[in-house]
């Protein structure tokens, strides 16, 4: 069994004065610590980290500090990719990075192995059996397991209003597994993104985005991924184990922000390791947030559910 490729893209640096960069780095570190707990003891992995020339030394230090290896650092600075991402009209600065990441994925990663493509805000809380089992043997199937966003769309898997071909419904762009030899041409990715950019930016999803999110044009890379991978068989991973934003006791994987504000839902050993690293990195603001959350977790969880209800209108959160 070949090593599972795990890909991250880290384009931020916690040495800046921007507090959000420090939070993003803390989320990345939490993700790595969770991988050490729930993946590395059970399956051989090799890490591919996209970074910039300015932060490569810092990202390398983090990986070395956590003793995670083997790791390849790839500088994501292709001028053609930057120019193309800049030509897309309806997207945010984060979307442009995600477009470059997607183009980089299909020419920079080994094609003969399983590739787990995840964001720096993905966290493991149990062994991801479904991912490990899929990596046990290559049966030649071109299937794509993925985490689905059932939170934003009130329990449904989104579709794309103006697309009439196949797609992977509900796909979240920050967690999916590619099988060996599945490869997408650069021209197909560019074509899909051009088509998406020709659509009205605020009415692409079915069901429609909740009113609170409807004025934001975003996630074009996610939409393109659901289209270009739609030609193969894909399936959404169990939503009670692979979750978007709302943490529950059954979760094995969570996509979200600041996971440390729900300490009672984090395994003790994982939280303890993360707290120790925060102290070493002098992340005093993160330590303060953990201490506050330990005293007020139920209140914070109620606020999160109420926020999701207000944002999406889905009463299933209450």
Image: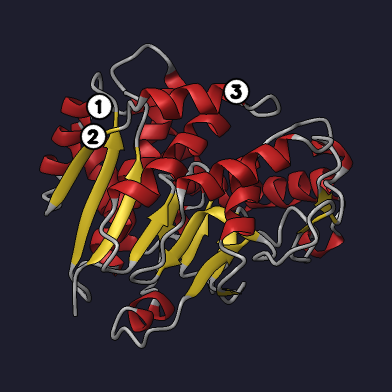
Q: Are marks 1 and 3 in contact (CB under 8 Å)?
A: no
Pointer 2 or 3: first along the chain: 3
Q: Position of residue 150 (x, y in %)?
A: 70, 62
Q: Is residue 168 above or below residue 43?
A: above
Q: Looking at the figure, which quarter contains the N terminus? A: bottom left
What's the distance in space between the residues labelled 2 and 1, CA to CA? 5 Å
The residue labelled by disc 2 is: 279
In terms of image quadrants, where is residue 166? bottom right
The residue labelled by disc 1 is: 282
Q: Position of residue 48 (x, y in %)?
A: 25, 48
Q: Nearer the viewer, mark 1 or mark 3?
A: 3
Q: Looking at the figure, which quarter contains the C terminus? A: bottom right
Q: Residue at x 14, y 33 (%)?
A: 61
- For the question of whether residue 247 can be seen, the reply is no
Q: Circle 1 — which element?
A: loop
Residue extending farthest to the front is 187
The residue labelled by disc 3 is: 87
Q: Is residue 110 left or right of residue 125?
A: left
In terms of image quadrants, where is residue 250? bottom right
Q: Residue at x 23, y 37 (%)?
A: 74
Instruction: Judge by depth and name the residue closer to the eye, 96 or 34.
Output: 96
Instruction: Judge by depth and name the residue closer to the eye, 26 or 121.
Output: 121
Instruction: Judge by depth and name the residue closer to the eye, 29 or 210.
Output: 210
Q: Is residue 253 left or right of residue 64?
A: right
Q: Circle 2 — which element?
A: helix
In terms of image quadrants, where is residue 126? bottom left
Pointer 1 or 3: first along the chain: 3
């Amino acid at each position: 069994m070949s090593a599972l490729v795990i890909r991250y893209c880290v384009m931020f640096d916690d040495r800046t004065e921007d507090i959000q960069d420090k939070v993003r780095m803390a989320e990345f570190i939490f993700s790595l610590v969770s991988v050490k707990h729930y993946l590395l003891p059970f399956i051989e992995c090799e890490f591919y980290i996209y970074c910039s020339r300015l932060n490569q030394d810092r990202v390398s230090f983090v990986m070395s500090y956590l003793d995670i290896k083997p790791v390849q650092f790839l500088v994501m600075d292709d001028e053609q990719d930057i120019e193309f991402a800049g030509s897309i009209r309806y997207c945010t600065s984060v979307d442009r990075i995600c477009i470059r990441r997607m183009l980089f994925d299909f020419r920079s990663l080994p094609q003969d192995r399983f590739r787990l493509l995840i964001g720096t805000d993905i966290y493991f809380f149990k062994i991801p059996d479904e991912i490990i089992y899929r990596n046990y043997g290559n049966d030649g199937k071109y299937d794509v397991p993925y985490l689905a966003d059932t939170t934003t769309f009130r329990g449904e898997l989104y579709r794309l209003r103006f697309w009439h071909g196949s797609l992977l419904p509900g796909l979240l762009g920050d967690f999916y597994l590619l099988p060996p030899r599945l490869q997408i041409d650069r021209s197909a990715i560019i074509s899909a993104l051009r088509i998406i950019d020709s659509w009205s930016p605020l009415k692409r999803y079915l069901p429609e985005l909740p009113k609170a999110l409807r004025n934001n044009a975003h996630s074009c890379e996610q939409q393109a991924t659901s289209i270009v991978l739609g030609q193969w068989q894909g399936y959404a991973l169990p939503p009670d184990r692979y979750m978007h934003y709302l943490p529950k006791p059954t979760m094995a994987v969570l996509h979200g922000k600041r996971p440390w504000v729900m300490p009672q839902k984090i395994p003790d050993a994982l939280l303890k390791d993360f707290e120790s690293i925060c102290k070493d990195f002098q992340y005093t603001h993160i330590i303060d947030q953990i201490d506050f959350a330990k005293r007020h977790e139920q209140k914070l969880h109620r606020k999160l559910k109420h926020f999701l209800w207000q944002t999406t209108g889905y009463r299933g959160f209450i």
